[in-house]
Image (spheres, rainbow, N blue to C red):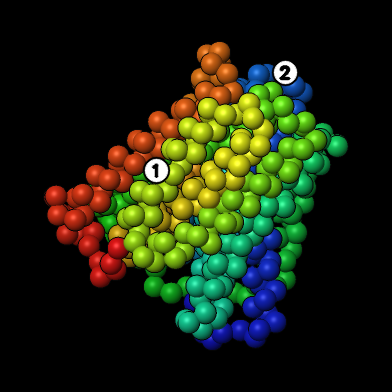
Amino acid sequence: MSDAPVSRGVYKFAVFALAIGAFAIGVTEFATMGLLPMIAEELGITVPQAGHAVSFYAIGVVVGAPLITTIAAHMDRKLLLLCMMGLFSLGNLASMLAPTAGLFNIARFVSGLPHGAYLGIGAVVAASLVPANRRGRAMSRVMLGLTIANIFGVPFAAALGNMFGWRSAYALVAALGMLTVIMVAVGVPRVKLGAVPSARGEIKALGRVQIILTLVAGSVGFGGMFAVYTYITPTMTDVAGVPSVAIPWVLAVYGLGMTAGSLIAGPLVDKSIERSATGGMILSALVLAAFGAFTQIAAIAIIALFLIGISGSMITTALQMRLFRESHDAPSLSAAMNHAAFNLANALGAWLGGIVITAGLGYRAPAWVGVGLCVSGLIVISVAIFLRRGGSPDPSSRTSVET
């Protein structure tokens, strides 16, 4: 942590710089979904094959989040942020230039490597610049970049791809990454590292039953949303009859749903982490079922997409808080693994959705895959709740935080 809070002007610029990086990450993570048909056509592959790029990015996050966090635990935070955004920009530049599907997938994997570590470390750096009673606000303002990305950035990238070709979207993201590098270099102060927990201690803490079950619930249950959202563009154009030029607006509806869900989830999680987690899973399963049943009616499909965004935010917020409660003595690695878990859900949902489409079941089928994933996640989190409440206690996971 820094020795003392910095001036208000320095703090605002630093947080803005870090939020630009979060915005770029949010755009590149979800923009591919809106560009799949164009990517598939130019690279000479099917839409489900193009969907593998989504899984490769997510796998990059799964690999990079814990690996970078562990290896670079003692590295200067500012230098690490610069290196991660440099790698991020390089991966997106390679995505823009990739001549084949194989090289495109590799580029997406590289782009995903810094995702989790940047978001986790960037939030911690922002918190170090202010007094203790303002650290939560500082961290949330960095994460605001992700929210804004889903409302404005992803739709804009889709519109840009429609006008100038899909490669222009990745050029935009690479440019945002380089802008972040410049702004972080100029405006983010160096911060002193506090006591760094040993990697062995953090890994040991992650072996607790409650932490494992929470991560598994996120990896499976949140995959339902990605099974649908990965193929949202061809689903809306081919089944719901939405014109391709309107897809950016459809993506914005999902972003608004995520934002609304974040606002709803906070008070609900404050009342009960467990009920919020299970309620989010149940709502997600119901809405995905409605989406699968009524995809041909554009208005219903769009409303369902908005509700999918709400339920997704409820799930992620509840599971994040549950993981924080159960892993208070393993903060760095557990935060990284949280990002990894949700991106494993991304990879799983995209992969399973592609399988059912390739099998000839149509673009409705991923929604039913999503229902199955949500139900599976609900079962896992229900087991975790049962064990924590006394069915088979896991004393090491108990803290003073109430549900």
Residue at the image point whose x is 66% and y is 24% from the top: 239
Q: Which residue is mark 1?
A: 282
Numbered disc total: 2
Residue at the image point whose x is 28% and y is 57% from the top: 205
Is there any visible trace of residue 208 in the rendered image?
yes
Residue 116 to residue 248: above or below: below
Residue 262 to residue 134: above or below: above
Residue 45 to residue 64: above or below: above
- The percent coordinates of residue 209 (x first, y second) are 24, 49
Residue 250 to residue 1: above or below: above
At mark 1, the secondary structure is helix
Q: Which mark is residue 290?
A: none
Q: Is disc 2 in contact with disc 1, using a CB cutoff of under 8 Å?
A: no
Horizontal relation, residue 352 to residue 275: left or right: right
Is there any visible trace of residue 341 in the rendered image?
no
Q: Which is nearer the N-term, disc 2 or disc 1?
A: 2
- The percent coordinates of residue 356 (x first, y second) are 51, 20
Horizontal relation, residue 119 to residue 328: left or right: right
> Which amino acid lies under the numbered mark 1 shown in the image of this protein?
Ile
Q: Quadrant of residue 105?
A: top right
- The percent coordinates of residue 31 (x first, y second) are 68, 41
- The percent coordinates of residue 88 (x first, y second) are 65, 49
Residue at the image point whose x is 71% and y is 34% from the top: 35
Horizontal relation, residue 188 to residue 120: left or right: right
Which tag is nearer the camera, tag 2 or tag 1?
1
At mark 2, the secondary structure is loop
Q: Which residue is mark 2?
A: 44
Q: Quadrant of residue 111?
A: top right
Q: Nearer the viewer, residue 133 or 306?
A: 306
Residue at the image point whose x is 48% and y is 82% from the top: 133
